């Protein structure tokens, strides 16, 4: 299991071994929705906000 730092609050987050790149996870400390942008090295970013015209 890898760990990465939450870009919102700085908490250390465990990333499951079966996680996929671009998967969304939630920070257990601050509740921010995060995207796994890299698995090696583990790196997280704030998940993109849904835009009004998505899915049209």
Image (tube, rainbow, N blue to C red):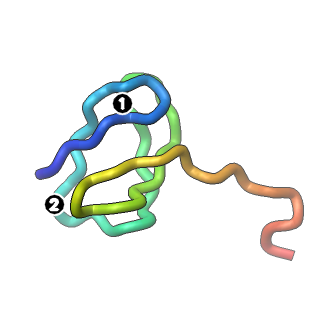
What separation in Å lies between label 2 and label 1 (alpha carbons)?
Answer: 17 Å
Q: What is the secondary structure assignment of the residue under circle 2?
A: loop
Which residue is under mark 2? 17
Which residue sits furthest bottom?
Answer: 56
Image-based side of 50 in relation to 36, left or right: right
Which residue is under mark 1? 28
Up/down of 36 relative to 33, above or below? below
Name the spot of residue 13 as percent of width and height, x first.
Answer: 27, 37
Label 2 Cα crowd, 10 Å radius (few <14 / some 14-19 / many 20+): few
Residue at left offset 27%, top offset 42%? 4
Up/down of 34 relative to 52, above or below? above
Label 1 Cα crowd, 10 Å radius (few <14 / some 14-19 / many 20+): few
Residue at left offset 51%, top offset 34%? 32
Seen from the viewer's position, the closer of residues 3 and 40 is 40
Name the spot of residue 19 as percent of width and height, x first.
Answer: 27, 63
**Between discs 2 and 1, the one toward the N terminus:** 2
Residue at left offset 63%, top offset 53%? 48
Which residue sits furthest front?
Answer: 41
Up/down of 25 relative to 55, above or below? above
Q: What is the secondary structure assignment of the residue under circle 1?
A: loop
Tell me where residue 56 sits by quadrant: bottom right
């Amino acid at each position: 299991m890898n760990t990465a730092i939450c870009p919102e609050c700085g908490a250390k987050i465990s990333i499951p071994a079966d996680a996929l790149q671009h998967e969304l996870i939630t920070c257990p400390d601050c509740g921010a929705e995060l995207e796994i942008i890299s698995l090696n090295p583990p790196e997280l970013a704030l998940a993109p906000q849904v835009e009004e015209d998505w899915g049209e």
